[in-house]
Amino acid sequence: MACSAHKWSFAARFRAGAYSWQASRLACQRLREAVSEIKKAEKKDPIIGAEGAVRLMEKIWPALEHVDSSSGALGSTVNKTQGDLIPIVVNAPADEKTRNNWLDRLWRAMEDDGVDYLSPVGDHWGELCGFPELAGRWADELVSTLRSCWSDPNPGSYFHGATACLSCLLTTDRYGELLDLLELPRCPSWHYRRYGVEALLALGRKAEAVQYAEASRGLNQPDSVINQACEEVLSSSGLHEEAYRRYG
């Protein structure tokens, strides 16, 4: 069956503006139901499952735009939804043309996303590309914009494709370029510098990776997450006692 011919039950429940201000609980329930439907389809045909995952992620912001998310429950459910959906797309045996179509659709959805619900998609962009050549083209397209944004002397510059660019550079083994780019922001952010840790690990420079992670600490940075990253690096080097002493 062609992907476009598959009928998704969730599609009707995720029309633009489908949920009102007080519909957080219902929206969470519908997201869980949609994920179950997509996983069931994936078992029969991984390509159709991935198409469903892309379609749902496209619909998240338009459908949930007016819902009160102040309790955090909706945001958590949206994050878990993407945690379930992204691997479905990553692992699908799709050809480059199909992946390119998915990426173009997801990129438009990220551009339209008013609250960065789809930030995990950008975080895994290199993996979603599936093909090194495709990831390389995306890196080439995004890197100049990110460099310009991070070099801007005026505070507040933001590029929604920052992690997508970093993810593609990491995926395509462009470690030096990635690390040089991460030197540009005036204030270190773990959200970005974690890609630098991964680059150093890929280069076999584990001690430097721990130092790099430690240098990422600062105001509003997630110390517990940084501790966990450092502990994992030390443990992978066989330094279990030091890992426990410093970060356990």
Image (cartoon, rainbow, N blue to C red):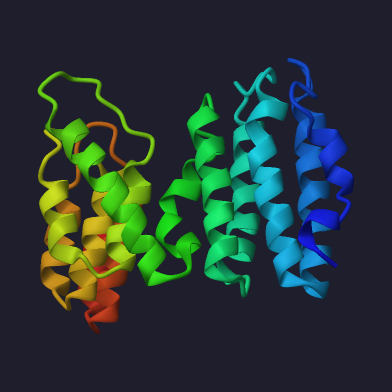
Percent coordinates x, y for residue 35 in the rendering: 76, 53
* Closer-to-camera residue (149/137): 137
Q: Is residue 13 left or right of residue 54?
A: right
Q: Is residue 71 above or below residue 215?
A: above
Q: Is residue 118 left or right of residue 48?
A: left
Percent coordinates x, y for residue 106 in the rendering: 55, 45
- What residue is at 70 percent from the left and 57 percent from the top? 51
Which quadrant holds the N terminus?
bottom right
Percent coordinates x, y for residue 3 in the rendering: 77, 60
- What residue is at 63 percent from the left and 30 percent from the top? 61
Q: Is residue 117 above or below residue 7?
A: above
Q: Is residue 57 left or right of residue 3?
A: left
- What residue is at 81 percent from the left and 64 percent from the top? 2
* Closer-to-camera residue (245/184): 184
Q: Residue furthest bottom?
A: 238
Task: Tell me, yes or no, if residue 134 can be seen here.
Answer: yes
- What residue is at 20 percent from the left and 55 percent from the top? 213
Total numbered badges shown on the rendered structure: 0
Which quadrant holds the C terminus?
bottom left
Percent coordinates x, y for residue 76 in the rendering: 61, 40
Quarter of the figure with residue 156 = top left
Task: Tell me, yes or no, if residue 228 can be seen here.
Answer: no
Q: Is residue 146 above or below residue 133?
A: above
